[in-house]
Image (cartoon, rainbow, N blue to C red):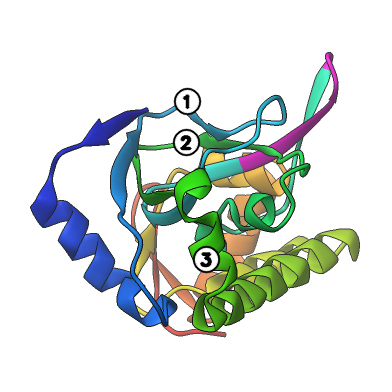
Amino acid sequence: METLNDRARLERYMKQLRIEERFGRELPRFLLLHYAPGDLLTTAFSPSKYLQFVAEGELTLYDMPDESRSIILQTNFNEVRLLGEVELLNSQFEPFFVEAHSDVYTLAVYLDHYRELLLNDPVFLRFICETLSDKLAGAVRSTMHLPLRDRVIASLRYASPGEEFGNIAAISSRLGVSNRQFLRVLKGLCEEGVLSHDKKGHYRIIRLP
């Protein structure tokens, strides 16, 4: 992880994430952090120092119930774009592992410096409630053992028509299925006109299901 001194990128991300709309009082000072693939944003071993808005990149969320195995948790990081809000509310919370799967950029706020400000800002607290609601909905979906097609459809609703995605192996791993199973679902969605297969390993969203 590194802190970047790139004011233009920071301001672009703040506009992209509509940061000023998330706060009703004083705007905290943001840092621009960069994580390389394989870096951990949070771990179960130590509490996070930051509240982080994820601006760009792909993440994997997992747990390690013992030393011999890890469990990929069904989470779509198109919807989970805030990390550290539970730690803000509960300093004893032990977070899951969140790993950068690509280059990841976040806007970060030091929790220790701004905890009181954040906890007394009703606009920000409302935003946290909405974020936690999305995460809870994702957790409920993961416990319902939805068919793979339904899980893929559920994740597409957070994307936009024209958006492209690839890296089939990484996505199928996060979904806990084989590449062949995932590709079979993608083929069906292409036949339905939801996706198009423009080039090998890359798909584009035509319409939202």
How many angstroms separate mark 2 from mark 3 (CA)? 26 Å
- Res 120 quadrant in image: bottom right
What amino acid type is highlighted by mark number 2? Ala
**Is residue 51 positioned above or below 103 on the image?**
below
197 and 107: which one is in front?
A: 107
Whether pointer 2 and pointer 3 mark residues with C-beta atoms closer than 8 Å, the reply is no
Q: Label 3's element?
A: helix
- Res 96 quadrant in image: top right
How many angstroms separate mark 1 from mark 3 (CA)? 30 Å
- Tell me residue 60's x, y (percent): 58, 41
- Binning the other alpha carbons within 10 Å of mark 3 as few (below 14), some (14 to 19) or many (20 upward) gives many
Q: Label 2's element?
A: strand
**Label whose residue precedes the other's in the sequence (2 or 3):** 2
Q: Taking 100 as reference, is 89 left or right?
A: right
Q: Which residues are magenta?
A: 61-68
20 and 2: which one is in front?
A: 20
Whether pointer 2 and pointer 1 mark residues with C-beta atoms closer than 8 Å, the reply is yes
Q: Taking 160 as reference, is 92 left or right?
A: right
Q: Which residue is mark 1?
A: 38
Give me the disc on residue 118. 3
- Tell me residue 40's x, y (percent): 52, 29
Q: Which residue is mark 2?
A: 100
The outermost residue toward the left is 8
- Res 156 quadrant in image: bottom right
**Is residue 29 positioned above or below 40 on the image?**
below
**Label whose residue precedes the other's in the sequence (2 or 1):** 1
